[in-house]
Image (spheres, rainbow, N blue to C red):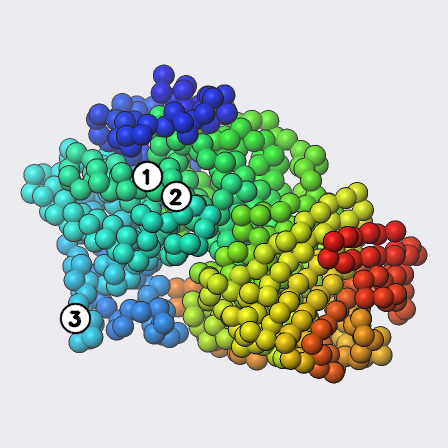
Amino acid sequence: MKLMLLALALLGLSSSPRLEAASDPAHHVPDTAPRTTILAGRHDAFRAYVTSGPGAESLARIKTDFDARCFDLPFPEEPHTYGDPSPSTRDTTKVDLWREQQDACGRISAVAEAATLLWIATGEDRYLEKAREWLLGSCSWSLDASAWASGPGPGATDVAYNDEAHFRLWRRLPIVYDQLREHLSPDERTTVLAHFRARGNRSVEWIKRTGNIERLQRNSLAVVPSSHPVRFMPMTALSALALWDDLPEAREWWEFAYVYYRDRFPPFGGDDGGWAEGVAYWRGVIEHAAFQDALAAIGDPLAYSDPFWRNTPYFQIYNVQPYRHTAFGDLSNAGRFNLEPVVADFMRHLARATGDGRLLTYAALLTDTRPPPADAGLANLDRIYPTAVEFLVRNFNAASLPLPAAASLDDLPQERWFRDVGWVSMHSALGRPAEDIHATFVSSPYGSFSHSHAHQNAFILNAWGENLALASGYREFHNSPHHDGWTRQTVSKNAILIDGHGQNPRDRHAIGAVTRYESTARWVLATGDAAAAYRRGPAGDAVERVTRDFLFVDRRYVVIRDRVSTRRPSTLSWLLHAEKAIEWDETGSMALVRTPGATLTTRLVASDGGAWRARVLDTFPVAVDPKYVRGGAANFTTTGSWEEQSHLFADTVAPATDHTVFAVLWPERGRTPPVPGALRVNLHDATTLVVTRPDGRTDRIHIDDTRVAVD
């Protein structure tokens, strides 16, 4: 009956699931353990699912891989401390050790959980013994890293030392215990629970202390969130469910997590489904969904009831293409991101949870050849999560929810404003990447905080599968010299500089705002105000106005109007970044970007008719760590390459207190750009320009602060 009621709620057939969620967080917690992954009374159903049902192929691959790769694997030695753990002190060598510890901990939890599930599925005691051995081994490790200054020593997996290593243990080991509890001796249970009490209490204390979790506000930086504590909340809830009968603290942990998700989540987004840290860190939503899945499994109508869950898939649909391209925010994969198998799989899961068939259509656009996560087996166990075992169990628990019919993306608007995070995505052919011109504009109330960059009023332009105007730079590791000195900075974006200066990075007050958004049959406009972000930078209080109008005309080309006012005369730098060498024509104030499948022609016009002084750099001013360029970084894989990029700096020559600059960007399919002179821009006055297009048409475009017209 619980599953039927939950299915009705998830499909929107229940009147108000959030109102029906109990004010008592414990109301829906089952009376009997186990309460996580495979609940009490469902083990026979799971065995049928993985031996003769839809999960049989996945289990067979997991079993084959486990027997070949994991069964004889010795339990790892306890990791040792590596010096000052502060992220600000990490250099390239220390990062290797930091990642190595995460890998070791990821393997421990993955092997223990896989062995547990194989034991449940097959009944073979050899798997039970393996799971017990690794669970007990992990509970022998120290949580005291206080002597790190004296040299390598124990305690490296404590949350306060290497929170990512701790995370990879704590997110799954209590769940393993939940299934093994009755097969541990009293002494073994005492050992495990003593360690779990210490690790769990330290984890919750650290999350509260460093993340302000109990005071966070939904879709707000009024109380400052922290990325890792927010990401650690699902495991806090799951460990509480797993240890419900074993530790009195577990019920406190559960209430702490439940109230957070009911009342405060998400701090990095809101009802529109955006995620301020960017499309790569949006993948953390998959971890948050694990708590929703746990709620669903126990029949709690709070599961997936928030508007965020209905809308957040569209943050990917509108901002992530099947091909690799740059994106706003930190990207860990050599500066490129694409529709990944794990995201496509998650979209299919969310289609079940929300009844939205469009998510299936988007998932079907996948071209990434890496195996689907449920079919990946155990070939590469490291810090990557979730594992194939987790996906298998999730799919089992969701199997009772009907999969909706695939629905077309064609009836969606071609543009979408994620007002909760200040992102606007514009398309010419949404869902048809080979035909699509795709522009993203950002002016965010989240500033350059957390994994966001100093990118207010910046844009990215992709077309026909090609990267034309990039968010430049890479992140070899967090706070690397290149990441901190280039990638985070405004200078690496398609934005502007004032007297050579950009916005303040790593600053929640360096905000932008989308102040105007309009869409008509011929054009879509987003206007951004980034004055606050530049005032937080070196230009300071001299900045009076920084606005950018970003106009997508006929879903064919872009017109940009920048307005900058300063208290004293200043110069303006207009920035453009590309994969390959940018060609600059000084006579026509024109930049040309060439890629194998498309070109981008950009013409700049200043309202005062002033000249431009331009330079193009074909190397990064702050170099990428050479170890990553040559592929020598330990415990690190990437599907991209760390190549140099091209950077245009077009500077106004004469200082002024007021600047109005227009840019017209014309993408052209194929390797051949329009013939010289085919794109002409004539400024009629400070608000009106006439664009002669390479396709033979002429547009008269008016843009001011209150009105836009395209004739």
- Viewer-closest of 355 and 651: 651
Which residue lies most toward the left here? 187
Of residue 328 and residue 701, the one placed in the foreground of this image is 701
Which of pointers 3 and 1 lies earlier in the amino acid sequence?
A: 3
Tell which circle, 2 or 3, labels the residue nearer the N-terminal end.
Answer: 3
Name the residue tied to disc 2: 264
Is 38 on the left-hand or right-hand side of 184? right
Asked which quadrant contains residue 163, the reply is bottom left
Badge 1 element: helix
Expressed as whole percent of the image width and height from the top left, the position of residue 32 reads 21, 26
- The answer to whether the residues at label 2 and label 1 have Cβ atoms under 8 Å apart is yes
Kindly state the secondary structure of the residue where label 2 is placed.
loop
Relative image position of residue 656 (x, y in whole percent): 71, 79
Q: In this picture, is 257 found above or below 469?
A: above
- Look at mark 3 in the image and give the residue it sits on: 147
> Residue at left 52%, top 43%?
273
* Image quadrant where residue 251 sits: top left
Q: Secondary structure at mark 3?
A: loop
Q: For the residue marked with disc 3, what is the amino acid?
A: Ala
Q: CA distance from mark 3 to mark 1?
A: 36 Å
Q: Is residue 473 left or right of residue 289?
A: right
Q: Can residue 126 be seen from the camera position used here?
A: no
